[in-house]
Every structure is written in structure tokens, then in C-alpha cells.
Amino acid sequence: MPSGSIFARLPEPDRRPVTLFFEGEPVGALQGDSVAAALLAAGKLTFRATPVGGAPRGPYCMMGVCFECLLEIDGVANRQGCMVQAADGMRVSRMLGARGLADSNGPAR
């Protein structure tokens, strides 16, 4: 799986390949990869933009502590990419800005 990423993948012949879609673009991963690891290996470094200022953010701790890897995964916003296992056909999008809070009258705005 060649990429322009600084994160080099070691050969792992025992894991089957899966394909997820980041912003509509196919991204190759291996079974057992986290979404964050798969995206980093593919050279995708920006996962979200901060609500105030729009500064780009990407994974930092890779263990669920920092929340810098928030993504929308299969239509669910604010998922930690480092804590979700990549699956074949998964749809992933960047989180841009703040997400609204749900109120008693329906979904988030």
C-alpha cells in the first residue's frame, strides 16, 4: 500500500485488506487498523477543524485521551478515529467546526 505518508507500514501478510472512504476517496487499510492509523498511513493528516478559529487538527495520542482525532464515521459525528476499528465500506468525513446540541424537539442543529 504505497503512500506519500511519513508513517511507514510494515509488511503484515496475515491481515486482510479493507477499504474505507474518507471524504469520498477510497483509502486502503488492514483488518485491525484503527480509522486514525489507516488515515495516517494514507497520508491524511487533518481530521477536523477547531470550532473557534478553524485550526486544523489530527491525531496526537492515538489512545483516546486527547480527542484531536474526532471524525464523522458512518454518519455519527464526534467519533474518536483512534478508538474505532476500520471496516470495509466505512464512510468517514472530517469534523469542521462545532456540532450543535440536540434539544427535546429533535436532532442537533
Image (cartoon, rainbow, N blue to C red):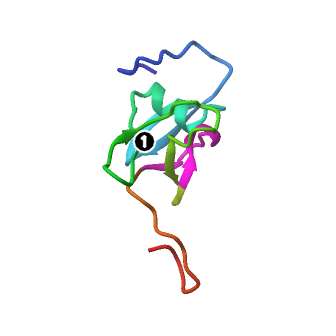
Q: Position of residue 14 (x, y in %)?
A: 68, 20
**What range is drawn magenta here?**
78-94
Magenta-drawn stretch contains 84: yes
Q: Position of residue 96 (x, y in %)?
A: 37, 53
Q: Nearer the viewer, residue 41 or 27?
A: 41
Q: Position of residue 35 (x, y in %)?
A: 55, 38
Looking at this rendering, what residue extends furthest in the bottom direction? 105
Looking at this rendering, what residue extends furthest in the front direction? 52
Residue 28 visible: no
- Residue identifier under label 1: 47
Question: Which residue shows up at 47% across the image and 18% down it?
Answer: 7
Say how many tags the image has.
1
Placement of 49 over or under 9, stated as above or below? below
Placement of 46 over or under 49, stated as above or below? above
Element at badge 1? Answer: loop
Location of residue 84 by image quarter: top right
Placement of 100 over or under 48, stated as above or below? below
Q: Position of residue 44 (x, y in %)?
A: 39, 33
Magenta-drawn stretch contains 64: no
User: Could you tell me the amino acid type at mark 1?
Assistant: Phe
Residue 81 visible: yes
Question: Which residue shows up at 44% across the image and 74% down it?
Answer: 109
Q: Nearer the viewer, residue 17 or 10?
A: 10
Q: Nearer the viewer, residue 62 or 93?
A: 62
Q: Nearer the viewer, residue 68 or 38?
A: 68
